[in-house]
């Protein structure tokens, strides 16, 4: 994903910018660039395809020095990875912009600007921003005022950093849908898309909010909110270890990662939602053209990632009308597969290094078109520099951040979010998706982090319920429709960290076998959103109660289910049925976590399991 770094100082800031880019490398990118205002008051830039080290080598050969500058790592969306498409983009010789996100109305703006005589030197959507700003400067010569005016014409998502040779005292920033943070120094200030990029230079940060525009000078920062009113944003002191490889206030990484989900889901959505539709270009420059050809989907993954794929199958068939097959990678890789024409191959992986998933991708790619090969490969992955991402044609990165707990939690929910974005994109491009439903789901996705927070607020209730499991050796998880894979994931979590034998069944299969096991020693956990399958599910639950089985039901608050003898109901926030799998995963994660804590197991590193299975 794209990264931004900027600085305004009294010293040469080239090294600060390049170091900042290096710190963002883990997010994945295909090219990098930097622009600085040199000692003669001119803008100069270097751009390279490939690693930041290539850019560094270019700077070693032809050094740049300056006290005001911006830098960028690019992940291609519009226009292939190439030097001419790499940021920073210029308009003339005096204005430079770097951009994260996607401008939806770039074609229309490009046409208007071309008519006005602006010459485009890249295929990017970003270049319209810099020319638009240049044009606005003609009638509004103050850079800050011009930026405020120009962004009003941009539809889509952006995090912007702007510098001008005409106004060398300031670095400008604008945020709408792509995060930006200001780093506060002494007599110098910085900007980045992630504070991680700036920890080398400061520990004080100011986070921009949606719609904010900031004027950053050496000696101060001024911010205007979405309505153009001057605002103060709180400055926050960062304490070493407050993030990443530190448990912070939490007892285990797993719990910390469960509670990070609202934030990382938000991050996964950032820059990928337009006003009422998903931004298809988030999947890469060729995505729209390629998605239009997709007639089938084959998903391959392992473990928790496989469960994410199972949920996606329900979504893809329902919303995009695309037949979807899913298989565990260790099986897929060793059998002869018959590929339907125009099938998109999708791999899902947290690490991007799982041996079976990688081997499956390589096998899929090795099939020639005559052997009925795949249309293209797409990776849904959490690690931008992983083998899976490098070897796939397209990718969508989940933005879960490093996941330390062996039992996957936040990687799963961000995978689900990414898969929903994919489903909506495919549905949109193929014209299979009702526009109103898409707008409704985009809206619901925006609200999802809040819903997840509400679900996590039930932490204490779930902890209490976990006591029911402390002495048990078996548990059954039930779900219907897209909640069946959620039940599977719930059972897997319980197995992984509490060592209780757990099995998941589609609720309708209960009477075809597992009912024989149900008695007072077999707790039955059920996920019950308020959908058309609810009444059927309720009768399945009666079957369990009739055999003396203890029921734990996570149910929509509008589902009309209440506590009773042997029935423990946890009321869940109401959510659109199609997004329920994401929400209902959270209480199941908490349940397995608290059961494991009660049993005193090694929660973060359960016996016999590894975080990343890079061998067969
Ligand atoms: C291991 C981990 C699981 C993970 C699976 C697939 O089994 O313990 O948590 O789901 O590998 O890993 P991946 O990195 O490909 O998602």
Image (spheres, rainbow, N blue to C red):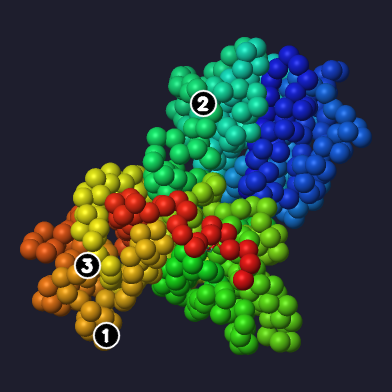
Label 2 vs label 3, nearer the camera: 3
Side of 538 relative to 487 (left or right) = left
User: How many neighbours does mark 1 have within 10 angstroms: few (below 14), some (14-19), or many (20 or more)?
Assistant: few
The 10 Å Cα crowd at callout 3, few under 14, some 14 to 19, many 20 or more, is many
Identify whether 464 is placed above or below 479.
above
Q: Secondary structure at mark 2?
A: loop
At horizontal 78% and vertical 27% (from top left) the residue drawn is 14
**Residue 124 in view, yes or no:** yes
Left or right of 517 on screen, residue 266: right
Label 1 and label 3: CA atoms lie apart by: 16 Å
Which residue position holds label 2? Answer: 238
- The residue that mark 1 highlights is 513
Which is more toward the observer, 408 or 252? Answer: 252
Q: Residue at x 26, y 81 (%)?
A: 514
Separation (CA) of disc 1 from disc 2: 55 Å
Residue 480 position within the rendered picture, expressed as x and y whole percent measured from the top left: 30, 73
Percent x, y for residue 90? Answer: 76, 35
Callout 2 environment at 10 Å: few (<14), some (14 to 19), or many (20+)?
some
Between discs 1 and 2, the one toward the N terminus: 2
Question: In x, y percent, where is residue 580?
Answer: 33, 60
104 relative to 344, above or below: above
* Left or right: 215 in relation to 576: right
Q: Is mark 1 within 8 Å of ligand 1?
A: no
In which image quadrant can residue 474 be found? bottom left
Mark 2 or mark 3: which comes first in sequence? 2
Label 3 sits on residue: 523
Q: CA distance from mark 2 to mark 3?
A: 44 Å
Q: Quadrant of the C terminus?
A: bottom right
Q: Is residue 499 above or below residue 543?
A: above
């Amino acid at each position: 994903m794209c990264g931004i770094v900027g600085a305004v100082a009294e010293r040469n800031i080239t090294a600060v910018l390049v170091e900042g880019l290096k710190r963002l490398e883990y997010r994945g990118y295909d090219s990098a660039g930097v622009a600085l205002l040199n000692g003669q008051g001119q803008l100069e830039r270097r751009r390279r395809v490939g690693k930041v080290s290539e850019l560094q080598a270019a700077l070693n050969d032809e050094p740049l020095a300056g006290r005001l500058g911006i830098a960028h790592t690019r992940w291609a969306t519009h226009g292939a990875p190439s030097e001419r498409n790499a940021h920073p983009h210029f308009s003339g010789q005096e204005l430079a912009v770097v951009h994260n996100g996607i401008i939806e109305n770039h074609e229309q703006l490009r046409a208007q600007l071309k008519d006005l005589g602006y010459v485009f030197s890249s295929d990017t959507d970003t270049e319209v921003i810099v020319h638009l700003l240049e044009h606005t400067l003609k009638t509004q010569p103050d850079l800050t005022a011009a930026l405020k005016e120009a962004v009003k014409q941009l539809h889509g998502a952006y995090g912007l950093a702007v510098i001008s040779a005409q106004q060398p005292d300031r670095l400008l920033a604008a945020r709408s849908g792509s995060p930006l943070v200001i780093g506060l120094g002494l007599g110098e200030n910085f900007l980045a898309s992630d504070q991680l990029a700036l920890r080398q230079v400061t520990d004080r940060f100011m986070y921009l909010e949606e719609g904010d525009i900031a004027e950053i000078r050496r000696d101060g920062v001024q911010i205007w909110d979405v309505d153009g009113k001057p605002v103060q944003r709180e400055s926050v002191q960062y304490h070493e270890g407050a993030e990443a490889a530190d448990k912070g206030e939490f007892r285990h990484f797993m719990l910390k990662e469960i509670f990070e989900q609202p934030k990382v889901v938000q991050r996964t959505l950032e820059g990928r939602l337009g006003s009422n539709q998903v931004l298809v270009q988030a999947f890469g420059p060729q995505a729209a053209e390629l998605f239009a050809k997709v007639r089938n989907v084959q998903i391959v993954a392992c473990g928790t990632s496989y469960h994410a794929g199972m949920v996606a199958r329900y979504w893809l068939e329902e919303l995009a009308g695309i037949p979807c097959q899913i298989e565990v990678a260790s099986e897929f890789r060793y059998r002869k597969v018959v590929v339907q024409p125009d099938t998109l191959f999708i791999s899902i992986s947290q690490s991007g290094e799982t041996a079976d998933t990688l081997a499956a991708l390589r096998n899929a790619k090795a099939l020639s078109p005559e052997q009925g090969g795949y249309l293209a490969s797409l990776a849904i992955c959490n690690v931008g520099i992983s083998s899976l991402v490098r070897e796939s044609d397209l990718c969508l990165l989940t933005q879960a951040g490093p996941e330390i707990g062996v039992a996957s939690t936040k990687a799963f929910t961000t995978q689900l979010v990414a898969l929903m974005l994919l489903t909506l994109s495919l549905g949109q491009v193929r014209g299979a998706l009702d526009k109103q439903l898409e707008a409704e789901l985009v809206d619901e996705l925006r609200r999802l982090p809040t819903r997840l927070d509400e679900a996590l607020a039930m932490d204490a209730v779930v902890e209490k319920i976990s006591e029911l499991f402390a002495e048990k050796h078996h548990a059954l998880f039930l779900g219907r429709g897209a909640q069946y894979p959620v039940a599977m994931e719930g059972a897997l979590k319980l197995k992984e960290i509490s060592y209780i034998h757990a099995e998941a069944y589609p609720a309708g299969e209960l009477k075809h076998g597992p009912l024989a096991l149900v008695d007072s020693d077999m707790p039955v956990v059920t996920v019950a959103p308020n959908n058309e399958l609810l009444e059927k599910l309720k009768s399945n639950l009666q079957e369990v109660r009739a055999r003396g089985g203890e029921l734990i039901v996570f149910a929509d608050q509008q589902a009309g289910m209440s506590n009773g003898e042997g029935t423990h109901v946890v009321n869940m926030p109401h959510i659109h049925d199609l997004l329920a799998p994401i929400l209902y995963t959270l209480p199941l994660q908490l349940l397995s976590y608290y059961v494991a804590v009660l049993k005193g197991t090694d929660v973060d590193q359960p016996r016999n399991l590894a975080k990343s299975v890079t061998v067969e």
